[in-house]
Image: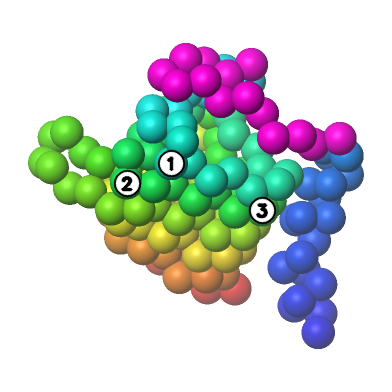
Amino acid sequence: MAREITKNKDITEGKKRFPNWKMPYIPERKLTKYQWLVQYASKLKLGKYSDIGAFTYINARNGVIIEEGVQIGSHCSIYSYSTIDGEEGKVVLKKNCKIGSHSVVLPGVTIGENSVVGACSLVKDSVPANSVVFGIPAKVMRKT
């Protein structure tokens, strides 16, 4: 029971930090008022109380789902399609996960609920729920 309370704490804190949270206007290929940018904006699903840092780029060509309470640091890149190697696949950021600044999430990756990705990480593989990962490439360092 105590673990469940901890897991849901982040959404409660998100509601406190953003009591008047509203879905932002997301223009195609232009900065939002919060200074982040999305390509294929119609294929982005953004959950309540999410927080995306300035200068983050999201390529949602194959779908990007950002669930409730997700926090993404500044200067991150999330790719559902890579022009470098042609990889593609939906990216899912599960409830309450956190992505550290300057991190890159590659196509087809799911970041599990309550997981934390350390700053400056390259996430090539899906991350299990309740994990801490970091590095280039990111590796699971701890499970909570």
Given residues 14 and 132, the one toward you in this image is: 14
Q: CA distance from mark 2 to mark 1?
A: 7 Å
In the rendered structure, which amino acid carries the disc numbered 2? Asn
Q: CA distance from mark 3 to mark 2?
A: 20 Å
Q: CA distance from mark 1 to mark 3?
A: 17 Å
- Picture layout, residue 53 above or below residue 117: above
For disc 2, the neighbor class at 10 Å (few under 14, some 14 to 19, many from 20) is some
The quadrant in which residue 130 appears is bottom right
Specify the label residue 43 is tagged with. 1
Q: Which residue is pictured at 43% across the width and 41% down the height?
A: 43
Secondary-structure class at tag 1: helix
- Left or right: 37, with 122 as reference point: right
- Left or right: 48, with 141 as reference point: right
Q: Which residue is pictured at 76% across the width and 34% down the height?
A: 22
What's drawn in magenta, residue-wise? 20-33
Specify the label residue 65 is tagged with. none
For disc 1, the neighbor class at 10 Å (few under 14, some 14 to 19, many from 20) is some
Q: Which residue is pictured at 49% across the width and 51% down the height?
A: 65
Check disc 3 and report the residue beneath it. 68
- Picture layout, residue 91 above or below residue 38: below
The quadrant in which residue 84 appears is top left
x, y (%) of residue 82? 21, 38
x, y (%) of residue 115? 55, 61
Residue 137 shows up from this direction: no
**Which circle's residue, 2 or 1, is located before the other in the chain?**
1
Q: Are marks 2 and 1 in contact (CB under 8 Å)?
A: yes
Check disc 2 and report the residue beneath it. 62
Secondary-structure class at tag 2: loop
In the rendered structure, which amino acid carries the disc numbered 1? Lys
**Which circle's residue, 1 or 3, is located before the other in the chain?**
1
